């Protein structure tokens, strides 16, 4: 039969602008969340994490916001640079065992 | 930082052959290793969880006889794709975890691109 490919959501921003990438997670029992960056042909690279007892955490140029009420995560990247172009995945850990459930991903494209 | 390697980085094989992929944690002992598969433009899908010295736990829909996992030591896990077919062509990624307080840190390998002709 015919196969239908999935297409990643894409976000295109101008260099220097701020980027916001959103993610809805599935398991209300999840208490640990991670954002990963994946460049083409490479494995995921850790960006930032947050535990469920927090609603905001900041890193270098990145901020993660967690809204447990609506099961929503966001990743904010300040002053986006061309090197930030990649696919970004959120992941949740519902069991504290390291078994991660990945979101569908968002492709970020930065225009110089 | 913790480093996880995979070998080979890419492999092309004929349909019906078996392919072994190695995952190594280079500078730490991993309590658990995980194997993921990723098709183009899609997310990572967990295939199995591997603990040293015990049988792997496979996710629903993953054939354990087709995807053989051996976790011989705290630094090495192998995934063997047996009798590979074109539909097995994918990007296979492993990760290795170690405890961090009440949670587990997880470190990903660079992935192995498998192409089955």
Image (tube, rainbow, N blue to C red):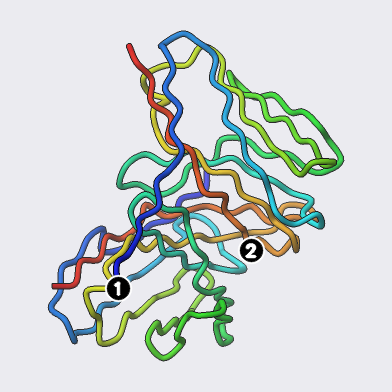
Q: Quadrant of the C terminus of chain B?
A: bottom left
The quarter holding residue A64 reads top right
Horizontal and vertical percent position of residue A83: 37, 23
Above or below residue B86? Residue A110 is: above
Tell me which residue sits at (47%, 57%) in the image.
Answer: B44
Q: Kindly identify which residue carries mark 2.
A: A99
Q: Kindly identify which residue carries mark 1.
A: A1
Alpha-carbon span between mark 1 and mark 2 = 33 Å
Relative side of B48 to B14, left or right: right
Circle number at residue A21: none
The quarter holding residue B60 reads bottom right
Mark 1, residues whose alpha carbon is within 10 Å: few (<14), some, or many (≥20)? few
**Eye-nearest disc, 1 or 2:** 1
Query: Residue A22 versus residue B103: which sits nearer the camera?
Result: A22
Looking at this rendering, what residue extends furthest in the bottom direction?
Answer: B65
Total residue callouts = 2
Mark 2, residues whose alpha carbon is within 10 Å: few (<14), some, or many (≥20)? many
Tell me which residue sits at (55%, 82%) in the image.
Answer: B56
């Amino acid at each position: 039969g015919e196969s239908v490919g999935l297409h990643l959501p894409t976000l295109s921003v101008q260099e220097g602008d701020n980027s916001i990438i959103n993610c809805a997670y599935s398991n209300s029992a999840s208490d640990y969340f991670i954002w990963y960056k994946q460049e083409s042909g490479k494995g995921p690279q850790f960006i930032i994490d947050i535990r469920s007892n927090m609603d905001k955490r900041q890193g270098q140029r990145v901020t993660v916001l967690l809204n447990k009420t609506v099961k929503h995560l966001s990743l904010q990247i300040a002053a986006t640079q061309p090197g930030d172009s990649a696919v970004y995945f959120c992941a949740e850990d519902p069991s504290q065992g390291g078994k991660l459930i990945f979101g569908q991903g968002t492709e970020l494209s930065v225009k110089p | 930082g913790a480093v996880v390697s995979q070998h080979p980085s890419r492999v092309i094989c004929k349909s019906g052959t078996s392919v072994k992929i190695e995952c190594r944690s280079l500078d730490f002992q991993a309590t658990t290793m995980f194997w993921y598969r990723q098709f183009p433009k899609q997310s990572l899908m967990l295939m199995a969880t591997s603990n040293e010295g015990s049988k792997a736990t496979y996710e629903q829909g993953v054939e354990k006889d087709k995807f053989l996992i051996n976790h011989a030591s705290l630094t090495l896990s192998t995934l063997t794709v047996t009798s590979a077919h074109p539909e097995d062509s994918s990007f296979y990624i492993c990760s290795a975890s170690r405890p961090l307080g009440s949670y587990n840190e997880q470190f990903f390998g660079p992935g192995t691109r498998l192409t089955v002709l």
